[in-house]
Image (tube, rainbow, N blue to C red):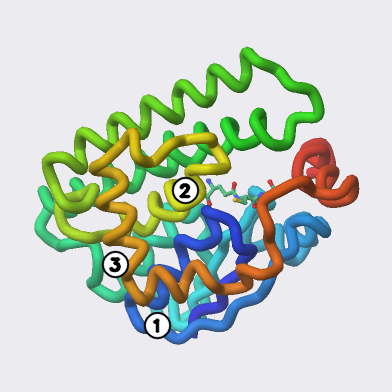
Amino acid sequence: MIDLYYWPTPNGHKIPIMLEECGLAYKSHPINMLKGDQFDPDYLKINPNNKIPTIVDQNGPDGKPYAVFESGAILMYLAEKTGKFMPRDMAARYEVIQWTIFQVANVGPMFGQCGHFLQYAPEKIQYGIDRYQNETKRLYRVMDKRLGAVPYLAGEYSIADMATYPWVKINHFHQINIGDYPNVKRWREAVGARPAVIKGCALLEDVMKLGNPDKEAFDNLFNKQKTI
Ligand SMILES: N[C@@H](CCC(=O)N[C@@H](CS)C(=O)NCC(=O)O)C(=O)O
């Protein structure tokens, strides 16, 4: 059994997608980041970075419970545990690792800041909007070129696609016209049609609407850096 500590955001969706793809049994525990659950001292024991997602594998290495944080590490852990969606062949495996790290090191942070400056920043700061939206568009171009050459980011469908899809699914939030990136559009339709992806993205979907957080949620999301 895997315990999944989760809130339905793009970084959150990645893990239920993988759990569904692998057919692993899991129990989800909502971490309501709008209410500040990510700062709970018990949660910080399994995620010292006060973010979702986190898993605890009750049957981890040596049969003992094992906690994993950072979505890319969780995806790799589950891929290694199940032998699925990350090939054992070294060259093919490193294709998957490169495109997974491309997501966690580039797509997540840049799209995240783009959404922040476009949708959440209390003042409109044009420099920030341009800086992060230009980076977002550049990353769409990198993906579009890649997906013009191969069906999925690492060649075969893999954890790299599961990591990236939830961020591309919300293209409107970053004011990206998906039609400008036809290969990404084709890929997004193929990934988005998979039953495990539909099911993974639906977990707790109703509780998190992208839009204006109220003051308490805004403070919990963006103003608590100094508390840990
Ligand atoms: N690099 C981390 C990023 C996780 C992340 O940014 N999670 C956000 C939600 S999408 C979060 O938990 N935010 C709450 C906070 O920062 O307090 C990962 O990939 O797991």
Queried on whether the Cβ of the residue with tag 1 lies below 8 angstroms from ligand 1, the answer reads no
Where is residue 143? Give x, y as percent: 28, 37
Alpha-carbon neighbours of circle 2 within 10 Å: few (<14), some, or many (≥20)? many
Whichever of callouts 3 and 2 sits on the residue coming sooner in the sequence is 3
Q: Answer yes or no: do the residues labelled 2 and 1 have beta carbons within 8 Å? A: no
Residue corresponding to mark 3: 80
Q: Nearer the viewer, mark 2 or mark 1?
A: 2
Q: Nearer the viewer, mark 3 or mark 2?
A: 2
Q: Residue at x 44, y 61 (%)?
A: 74
Residue corresponding to mark 1: 24
Whichever of callouts 2 and 1 sits on the residue coming sooner in the sequence is 1
Q: Nearer the viewer, residue 157 or 75?
A: 157
Q: Answer yes or no: do the residues labelled 3 and 2 have beta carbons within 8 Å? A: no
Q: Nearer the viewer, mark 3 or mark 1?
A: 1
Tell whether 7 sits left or right of 159.
Answer: right
- The kind of residue on which mark 2 rests is Trp
Classify residue 17 by image quadrant: bottom left
Classify residue 197 by image quadrant: bottom left
Q: CA distance from mark 3 to mark 1?
A: 13 Å
Residue corresponding to mark 2: 167
**Label 3 secondary element:** helix
Whichever of callouts 3 and 1 sits on the residue coming sooner in the sequence is 1
Where is residue 129? Give x, y as percent: 60, 22
**Label 2 secondary element:** helix
Q: Answer yes or no: do the residues labelled 3 and 1 have beta carbons within 8 Å? A: no
- The kind of residue on which mark 3 rests is Glu
Residue 18 higher or lower than 156, as above or below: below
Q: Nearer the viewer, residue 60 or 212?
A: 212
